[in-house]
Amino acid sequence: MKNYKSLVLIALIVGLGTLSSCKKTKVTEKDAIEFTYIEEGKEKPANGAFLLYNLEILTQADSVIYSTLTQPFPGYLMANDTIKAQNGMDEIFLALRKGDSITFEATAKVIFSGNQPAPIKEGDLIKVRLGAYDVKTEADMQAFYEEAMQKEQEKAAERAKTLLVEEAKTIEAYIAKNNLKAQKTESGLYYVIEKEGTGEATTPGTTLSVNYAGYLITGALFDTSYPEIAKANNMFSEERPYEPLPVSVGLGQVIPGWDEGLMLLKKGSKAKLIIPSPLGYGESGAGAMIPANSILVFDVEVTDSKK
């Protein structure tokens, strides 16, 4: 919470003040942003205190680009009067007081420092609504954050339950279409043992060496340890090794679907794991190749097992 290298980025990661009738207009020294106080606050946060704010960014046509109102946590910054403004956005945020409600417009280049999301262009006019509503000490901020995260985790768990039911229908249709004899665990993982392994049963902490090919349920490959599969899908890279991945299973080092699925396998096993999104990368996804709420299909082979 104490990294202020880019105040603008902090602003863009973190809702919307209450509007009233008392208006006052100012212009920033940098970038000449003309901003209007719909309501002007009086309490300046002391150095080290945290100022909470709501932020909404819209297109000229009022389409929401970003809003903290849809996020689990509001915007915040720690007051520090030694920080120097680098641009007009910094000036506005550094001067915020509790009770401020501000609105302004500027080009996307100014608002986003040239890093505007597609398809927004640098010259597009962007609307910003900003409202600072509370000041907290560091201790209060930490407690507030923990409470907010706990509530978000509870909501996420409820969403995951719904997704498991919905995605089961998609997975079962996939299984039927591909004539698979899959089994389902209590958690919602589907698996097919294609070749039984030998040796001792896998227990938590066992290190398995695993070759794999990972696909979206649509069939799109997103990663593999097999060079021939990578080449066949135009994904081969000379810069990475293609070899079995060592995984200490049952310790939470990999996605839940892998942790649970690999525990069912032994040295020499081959299997297909069909993983609903809550047991995969969930609502966050993983990079450009794995969107949020993706059902994953892994072909895995255990080449070695060490206790």
Image (cartoon, grey):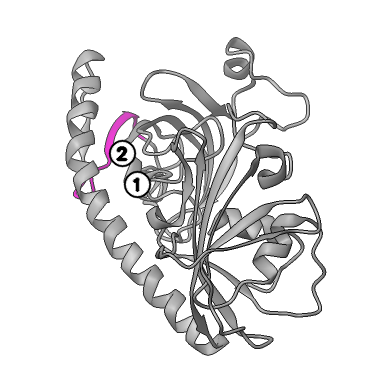
Asked whether residue 159 is in view, the answer is yes
Q: Position of residue 56 (x, y in %)?
A: 48, 52
Question: 142 or 93: which is nearer to us?
Answer: 93
User: Which amino acid type corresponds to the residue marked 1 in the rendered image?
Assistant: Leu
Q: Are marks 2 and 1 in contact (CB under 8 Å)?
A: yes
Q: Position of residue 218 (x, y in %)?
A: 37, 19
Q: Which residues are magenta?
A: 185-196
Q: In the image, is residue 140 part of the stretch drawn in magenta? A: no
Disc 2 crowd rating (10 Å Cα; few below 14, some 14-19, many 20+) is many
Question: 267 or 29: which is nearer to us?
Answer: 29
Q: Position of residue 195 (x, y in %)?
A: 35, 28
Asked whether residue 264 is in view, the answer is no
Q: Which mark is residue 153?
A: none
Q: Position of residue 110 (x, y in %)?
A: 71, 44
Please give the residue where the numbered disc 2 appears in the rendered image: 276
Disc 1 crowd rating (10 Å Cα; few below 14, some 14-19, many 20+) is many
Q: Which mark is residue 279?
A: 1
Residue drawn at 36 percent across, 24 percent down: 217
Side of 284 relative to 118 (left or right): left
Residue drawn at 27 percent across, 41 percent down: 189
Q: Secondary structure at mark 1?
A: helix
